[in-house]
Amino acid sequence: MDSHQCPQTRPPETCLAPTRPVRASDHWEHVTIRYLATPNHNQPSQTYGPIMSLKLGTMTTIVFSSSDGAEEVFKRHDKNFANKTVIDAVRAHDNDKLSMGWQPADAHWRICHTEIFTVKRLEANQGLRQIKVQDLLDHVLECSQTGRAIHIAQAGFITSLNFLSNTIFSMDLAHYDSEKSHEFMGLVKGLFDAFSKPNLTDFFPILGFLDPQGIRRQSEFYMGNLLAILNDIVNTRLESDGHGDNDDMLNALIKLHQENESKFSRKDLIVVLLEYKGHLYTPFPSVICLLREQKLPQPHWNGQWRNY
């Protein structure tokens, strides 16, 4: 039966809620909180009220069609709804138990504010951003002079990768003409795809042991390879006695680990690094914005990039 229509014999309050698209915003335990922001979706609230509950399998979705109700939840009670629904794919290698992205807001989150995203550290990266953007421009110029085609997505990925890897490890992890760069990009993309695919086991957990779509196996493979790469980098830094002269993120995390292993273990350290590497799959328009900000302040250049 169409959920938008009800028999004449049934009162409106007993009708099923309309099955229209909703806009994602936040999660809380096994309940998903969403807000209908599109104006033409306001009519259901007149029949079903400002809050609606939809359920598929074991996953419940709470839909707010009122801006006042959504504001009450997301601005005034955001801490109570900060937790996220743990999907099956992120359980690979116990990532759901270690990752800050899937844990409740706790002391681990404060590490980002006090040790990683400090004003001093971010300001120190200004020159690094300019260097990485200049590397990209040099690569584009070289390809132009030799008549080679440029793989835009790959070039943007490598630029983002080297910017983050220098911030974290003080080293380049990829080069524009390196085959290893393609492999690393494939690992990050594969993990991103595994996390973003709709998974039957998220709605029907009883199917978890079957993994009918193979998403858990895919996640285990890509995450395992990324963790192995990060473990090798950390081992190399630890074997160097001291941590070198670089004041990078890895040094800060190693220091936290050595000061209190019970609160910040080796696994925690690796997972934090994995989370930041997980942001590498950046759309190329973001790199264009970085180019405009760092290297192309002239109005005529900005106009050309905007047209591009």
Image: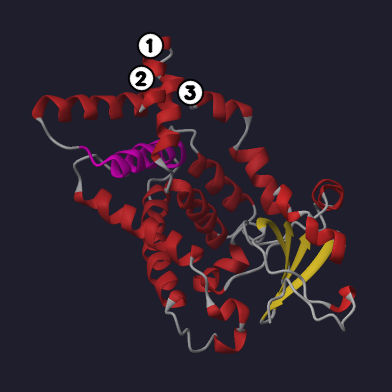
Determine whether 24 is above or below 136 in the image. below
Q: Contact, CB < 8 Å: mark 3 with mark 2?
A: no
Residue mark closest to the camera, 3 vs 2:
2
> Would you name the residue on which mark 2 appears?
304
Residue at x 41%, y 24% (from the top left corner) = 306
Q: Which residues are magenta?
A: 150-172
Secondary structure mostly seen in the magenta stretch = helix
Q: Is residue 104 left or right of residue 72?
A: left
> Would you name the residue on which mark 3 appears?
126
Residue mark closest to the camera, 1 vs 3:
1
> Would you name the residue on which mark 1 appears?
300
Q: Circle 3: is it few (<14), some (14-19), or many (20+) Cα within 10 Å? A: few
> Visible in this render: residue 298?
no
Q: Contact, CB < 8 Å: mark 1 with mark 3?
A: no
Quadrant of the rendering where the N terminus is positioned: bottom right
Three-letter amino acid code of the residue under disc 2 = Gln
Residue at x 44%, y 80% (from the top left corner) = 213
Three-letter amino acid code of the residue under disc 3 = Gln
Residue 177 position in % (x across, y down): 19, 41
Residue 238 position in % (x across, y down): 43, 50
